[in-house]
Image: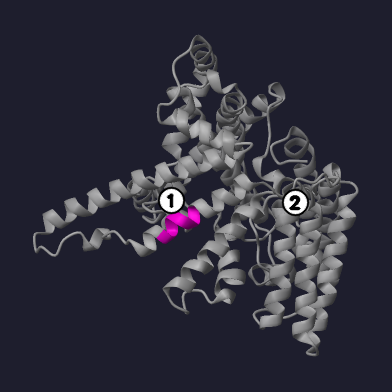
């Protein structure tokens, strides 16, 4: 089951939310959420729900053993090997065997193992819990069912964000459900649903059409449209999912951290990774980069550590060399920014002329923004491609290696429907932060104490969200194209 489905929006969520609101006891509320989460996962993965429960049970036991104080390192080591082993068997067996066959020119049978949905997310959550218990960053949880709820909670189970145990440990034992939080959570969920259904699906269908077309039918314009469409699809698909997860958490009394902060407004690749999939980049920083030595062992070792992290970041996304190369590609640009550091905006001039400094600061910001968008866009072409041959061919078309055949013109006009054009423009506009407008709204209506205007603004937002919900449901009822990109991870 996915959030952007009529089954979830019209049946699952309303039933669970009403039952949850009616139950007085927190223990019973937790029980309901566990049952609902297992049913949610079993809807699409009836067999692998046992795998997830087994993973939770094993990590619960290892955390208890580590907290007991004897052989802590040994139990941590076994726990890490177990979690990574399960991930490797289900996600990377085919990739490893295929790579061996290609490298050694042999024909080892490639096993067909179905990938459990969300295994990368719930495995990383389980690992973070056990590691934090080992480090003493969080107290061990003796109640198995609270650990089960932490890992299986349906809002973040299948596509994140990756939640650390200590961030919600208090809420597992003591939380309140308020009308204000539920209503705000609903609005956040609807806006995330609109991102996914209205924008991501529209541009995603065009991206799939173009990336699936014959190369001879791709010209300069359609290659760039394909790249930009996929760039918008993956952002609105995943950030929309994160918005829905955060909203759902608020409905049930949980607070999840933000997972995206306008990544396409970044002025460098380093800045991009401070804004994109924040929970994953934070996880790798805390549980891989820092343990490797971080930036404490010299510039060369720091560079090696970053390359290792981005190699693993790419591999985490999928069992394909395109993902690995995408990760290393981002790591390479991070190293370039570290080793050949360009002047920052506030270093643009030592002149006392404030106006000159301001102009140079804006210029560096604009140039950094253009550079970042170009690097990220090309990177996502690699990420989306089936293989590196397709990636290089598509990038070549983007920079003028293809002509304008009759087939390419026909494909381009077939894709440029009015709805696609409208959603493409909307996707570009809403990907940009508008801080000045946000500050004005906050000062004028929210922080001013003008209750009438605050109530009016709130009513407008709820009316807009209801209209968007109806629009999304109409689109879902009449359109079969509704993928979730991050399900494959």
Residue 382 x/y as whole percent = 55, 41
**Disc 1 secondary structure class:** helix
Characterize the magenta stretch by its predominant secondary structure: helix
Dividing the image into 4 quarters, which one contains the N terminus? top right
Residue bearing the label numbered 1: 451
Looking at the rendering, the stretch of residues picked out in magenta corresponds to 330-335
For label 1, the crowd category at 10 Å Cα-Cα, with few meaning under 14, some 14 to 19 and many 20 or more, is few
Residue 54 x/y as whole percent = 88, 63
Report if residue 317 is visible in the image.
yes
Colour mapping: one colour
Residue 386 x/y as whole percent = 64, 36
Q: Which residue appears at 76% of the width and 77% of the height?
A: 77
Does the magenta portion include 333? yes
Examine the rendered structure and indicate whether residue 182 appears above or below residue 432. below
Q: Is residue 151 left or right of residue 186?
A: right
Q: Which residue appears at 59% of the width and 21% of the height?
A: 214
Q: Is residue 286 left or right of residue 347?
A: right
Residue bearing the label numbered 2: 100
Q: CA distance from mark 2 to mark 1?
A: 67 Å
> Mark 2 vs mark 1: which is more N-terminal?
2
Q: Is residue 416 left or right of residue 448?
A: right
For this rendering, which residue is in front, 126 or 285? Answer: 285
For this rendering, which residue is in front, 142 or 238? Answer: 238
For label 2, the crowd category at 10 Å Cα-Cα, with few meaning under 14, some 14 to 19 and many 20 or more, is some
**Residue projecting furthest to the top:** 406
Residue 234 is tagged as none
For this rendering, which residue is in front, 81 or 33? Answer: 81
Q: Nearer the viewer, mark 2 or mark 1?
A: 2
Q: Which residue appears at 52% of the width and 11% of the height?
A: 410
**Disc 2 secondary structure class:** helix
Does the magenta portion include 262? no
């Amino acid at each position: 089951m996915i959030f952007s489905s009529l089954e979830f929006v019209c049946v699952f969520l309303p039933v669970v939310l009403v039952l949850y609101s009616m139950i007085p006891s927190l223990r019973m509320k937790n029980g309901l959420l566990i049952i609902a989460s297992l049913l949610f996962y079993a809807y699409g993965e009836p067999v692998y729900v046992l795998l997830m429960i087994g993973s939770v049970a094993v990590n619960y036991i290892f955390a208890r053993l580590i907290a007991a104080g004897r052989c802590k390192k040994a139990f941590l080591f076994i726990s890490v090997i177990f979690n990574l082993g399960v991930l490797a068997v289900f996600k990377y067996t085919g990739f490893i065997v295929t790579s061996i066959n290609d490298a050694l020119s042999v024909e080892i049978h490639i096993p067909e193992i179905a990938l459990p949905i969300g295994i990368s997310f719930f495995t990383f959550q389980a690992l973070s819990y056990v590691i934090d218990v080992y480090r003493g960053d969080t107290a061990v949880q003796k109640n198995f069912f609270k650990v089960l709820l932490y890992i299986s909670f349906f809002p973040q189970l299948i596509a994140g964000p990756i939640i650390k145990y200590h961030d919600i440990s208090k809420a597992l034992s003591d939380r309140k459900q308020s009308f204000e939080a539920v209503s705000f959570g609903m609005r956040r969920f609807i806006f995330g649903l609109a991102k996914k259904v209205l924008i991501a699906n529209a541009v995603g269908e065009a991206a799939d059409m173009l990336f699936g077309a014959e190369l001879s039918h791709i010209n300069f314009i359609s290659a760039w449209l394909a790249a930009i469409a996929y760039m918008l699809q993956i952002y609105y698909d995943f950030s929309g999912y994160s918005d829905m997860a955060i909203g759902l958490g608020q409905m049930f009394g949980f607070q999840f951290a933000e997972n995206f902060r306008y990544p396409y407004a970044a002025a460098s690749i380093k800045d991009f990774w401070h804004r994109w999939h924040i929970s994953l980049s934070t996880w790798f920083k805390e549980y891989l980069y820092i343990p490797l030595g971080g930036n404490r062992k010299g510039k060369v070792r720091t560079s090696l550590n970053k390359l290792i992290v981005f190699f693993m970041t790419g591999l985490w996304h999928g069992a394909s060399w395109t993902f690995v190369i995408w990760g290393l590609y981002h790591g390479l640009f991070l190293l370039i920014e570290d080793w050949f550091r360009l002047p920052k905006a506030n270093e643009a001039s030592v002149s006392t002329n404030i106006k000159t400094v301001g102009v140079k600061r804006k210029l560096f910001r604009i140039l950094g923004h253009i550079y970042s968008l170009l690097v990220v866009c090309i990177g996502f072409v690699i990420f989306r491609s089936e293989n590196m041959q397709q990636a290089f061919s598509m990038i070549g078309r983007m920079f003028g290696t293809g002509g304008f055949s009759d087939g390419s013109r026909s494909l381009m006009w077939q894709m440029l429907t009015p709805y696609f054009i409208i959603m493409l423009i909307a996707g570009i506009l809403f990907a940009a932060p508008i801080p000045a407008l946000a500050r004005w709204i906050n000062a004028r209506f929210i922080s001013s104490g003008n209750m009438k205007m605050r109530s009016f603004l709130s009513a407008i937002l709820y009316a807009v969200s209801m209209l968007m919900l109806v629009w999304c449901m109409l689109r879902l009822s009449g359109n079969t194209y509704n993928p979730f990109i991050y399900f494959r991870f």
